[in-house]
Amino acid sequence: MLFDGPREKIWYYHDIVKDDMRNGNGLRVTIFLAGCNHYCQGCHNPETWDPTNGILFDEAAYNEAMEAVDHDYIQGVTLSGGDPFHPANRYATNLFVQDFRKRFHTKKDIWIYTGYTWEQLHDKNSPDYDALNTLASIDVLVDGPFKKELADVNYHWAGSTNQRVISVPKSDDHNIVLYEDEKKGIFQGKLLSGRFNFTSPLVIPPSTEIEEKTFNPEDVFTELERRGWKESMLKHK
């Protein structure tokens, strides 16, 4: 079990937030873990950088989180921090994710916030490649370090516009598909061989038109502006 392994492989955490609406879609349970080696300037949670500065995630904490998730109105769990993919956290993060999947199957979704980029986690020559087994079992990854100069309070589900909200099941190491919230009409963007491809009903302004076009990266935000979108609502770097 998650809390039965060697102490150095067990999470330390800072908080379990219930009925959270800020860290993912819908009402969620968010676990803020200890441990981050990105040291972002302007970080909202610098107290979480030390991987041992927190509360040991023991059986009581595990049960608290699972009981909080096990309500019909809770959409899923979010792992944040800190960084769930900090080297000290990866073993326990994988165990938690696999256990969560066995327990809830696809009834609940899993979001992870990390300072690592999608590309780093998919680089076979990187020590961060060992996170792939965990990635394969989650629904959404919000990737990249927080950058103070790119902070945007209107950027949905992330703190700075370099970060991407990625639909993991639809993405691979060559194709990134951004998470689509159908209720809000956010269309999906794909990065295909260095080009953006948008396929969606145009909902801002309202329209039933379906478009499929490919744009060079430098033309992407001109097209977004034409459609009436703010640059901060969809950004890929």
Image (tube, helix red, strand yellow):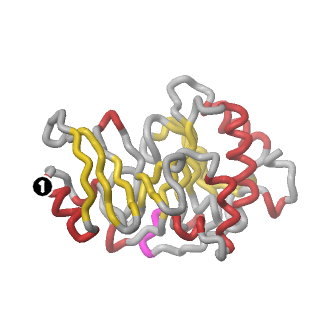
Query: Residue at the location (70% across, 68% down)?
Result: 87
Question: Please, what secondary structure does the residue beneath circle 1 have?
Answer: helix
Which residue carries the number 1 mark? 226
Residue 101 position by quadrant = top right
Query: Residue at the location (50% across, 53% down)?
Result: 171
- Vertical arrangement, residue 22 with respect to residue 151, above or below: above
Q: Considering depth in this image, is 52 or 102 the residue closer to the camera?
A: 102
Q: What is the x, y in percent for residue 119?
A: 53, 68
- Vertical arrangement, residue 153 with respect to residue 129, above or below: above
Left or right: 166 in relation to 208: right
Q: Considering depth in this image, is 183 or 33 the residue closer to the camera?
A: 183
Would residue 52 be visible to someone looking at this image? no
Q: Considering depth in this image, is 114 or 199 the residue closer to the camera?
A: 199
- Vertical arrangement, residue 11 with respect to residue 219, above or below: above
- Vertical arrangement, residue 49 with respect to residue 187, above or below: below
Query: Residue at the location (70% across, 61% down)?
Result: 89
Q: Which residues are drawn in magenta?
A: 41-45
Callout 1 amino acid:
Arg
> Split into 4 quadrants, where in the image is the N terminus?
top right
Left or right: 46 in relation to 104: left
User: Label 1 crowding class (10 Å Cα cut-off): few <14, some 14-19, many 20+?
Assistant: few
> Split into 4 quadrants, where in the image is the C terminus?
bottom left
Q: What is the x, y in percent for residue 24?
A: 46, 45
Q: Main secondary structure of the magenta part?
A: loop
Q: What is the x, y in percent for residue 73?
A: 50, 26
Check residue 44 for magenta coloring: yes
Check residue 20 for magenta coloring: no
Residue 191 position by quadrant = bottom left
Q: What is the x, y in percent for residue 176?
A: 45, 57
Q: Considering depth in this image, is 212 or 177 the residue closer to the camera?
A: 212
Query: Residue at the location (74% across, 54% down)?
Result: 92
